[in-house]
Image: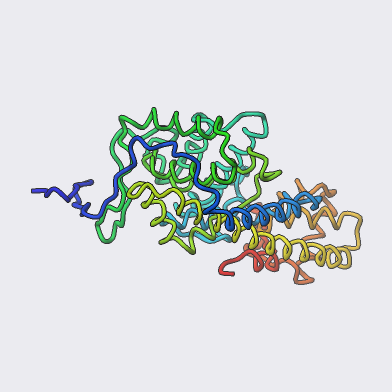
Amino acid sequence: MVGKTEILIHNTTYDSSEAVDYHYGVFPPPAPDLNLLQKPFAAALMSLTKYDTLLRQLPNSELLLAPLRARDAVVSSRMEGTISTIEEVLRLEADADEDTPAPIQRNDTLEVALYARALRQAEKQIADGYKISEHLIKSAHRVLLSHGRGAEKRPGQYKLDQNYVGDRPQRKIKFIPINAHDLPDAMNSLVGFITDSDMMPLLKTAIAHAEFEALHPFEDGNGRVGRMLITLMLWQQDVLSAPRFFVSDYFERHKDEYIARMRAVSSENDWTSWCHFFLEALGSQANENLAMVGSIQAHYDHMREQFRDVLRSQWSVNALDFIFANPIFRNNRFTRNAGIPKPTAHTFTRKLQEAGLITVLEPPAGRAPGLYAFPSLLKIVQEPR
């Protein structure tokens, strides 16, 4: 017999004695008192402005930040127990959409790659003029769970049953999200808040993120979709000039506080402490991203000279740009997409390998093209920092 504080989920009993329930009837909250948030608010805004100014000044910011997208996908997915590495994800991306079938990948690696793909799709929709909406959120979720283990968890569709947030190994429920019956109205309210509220953008983003996670609208993938929305909201509200901000590192390092502050929103109606934590996260992560992008830019400048000296060709920058955007790549994709005459491109991989600038992960075999890595860039973005 299941007791009052026990919940049976898939034939397993979980302890819910410490569970916090969703905060019915209190969303949206009034704007937090900015006097209590002045210091982290100012610091976050200044750091984000510096970061965005750097990106505006870089002629190739999308190119330079490509490997950071993979890193953010790895970290965000790891927060939900999906363990993979940047190298595994980039290997999978190297074979994406190729005529040659890719080798079977671990489910974890596939799920991380799908996170990056879902974010890119949402970014394109906003770039095409669409606002953040339930359709955009569902579309991102559909891509996120389109393959692997998530494909059986209603991709792109809201939950039909009550879901729970907790500690599976300890069999404890920590949070009980909104019930499925009340979810449609709550999601409509959340999207209306995102699109129509005149609250300051950073505070609006903080509150919207906490609310989305508290609603937990999908059977799976809620954390990843919620973290995507942070970048998309900052961009759509013109805090950032492009959707190139990655905050998962900070949340993962402070995961216990991240969860505790969100629980306090529901248990104590404490939106202010959550906003304080969120603003500190934005400021700290913006500074880290600033340093990372600076390191990547410096490495690009150094490698431009190295590639020029090794290749001695007018196409050396084309080669560098392709390899920076694809630090793990198949040779046939390089020869086809780098904007270099094919006979020249074929000689480039040999010269770069002989100079030690790229390494062979898989040698060419028959009709199968070789797989190469750009280790000096991977070292910069690899974890931990």
Q: Position of residue 53 (x, y in %)?
A: 75, 52
Q: In which quarter of the image is residue 369?
A: bottom right
Whether residue 91 sits left or right of residue 174 in the image: it is right
Of the 4 image quadrants, the one containing the C terminus is bottom right
Do we see residue 24 in this rendering? Answer: yes
Residue 302 appears left or right of 365: right
Number of numbered markers: 0
The way the protein has been coloured in the rendering is rainbow
Please report the residue visible at 77 percent of the width from the left and 49 percent of the height from the top: 56
In front: 67, or 368?
A: 67
Residue at x 34%, y 41% (from the top left corner):
23
**Which quadrant of the figure has residue 361?**
bottom right
Up-down relation of residue 308 to residue 206 (above or below): below
**Which residue reaches farthest front?**
35
**Residue 46 picture location, percent across and down:** 68, 55
Which residue is pictured at 65% across the width and 61% down the height? 287
Foreground pick, 4 / 150: 4
Q: Which of 337 and 126 is in front in this view?
A: 126
**Outermost residue toward the left in this view:** 1
Q: Residue 256, position in %: x, y?
A: 41, 61
Q: Which residue is drawn at 49% across and 56% down?
A: 277
Front residue (pair 327, 233): 233
Q: Is any atom of residue 330 visible in this view?
A: no
Examine the rendered structure and indicate whether residue 19 appears above or below residue 157: below
| x and y, in percent, of residue 165 in the image | 33, 49
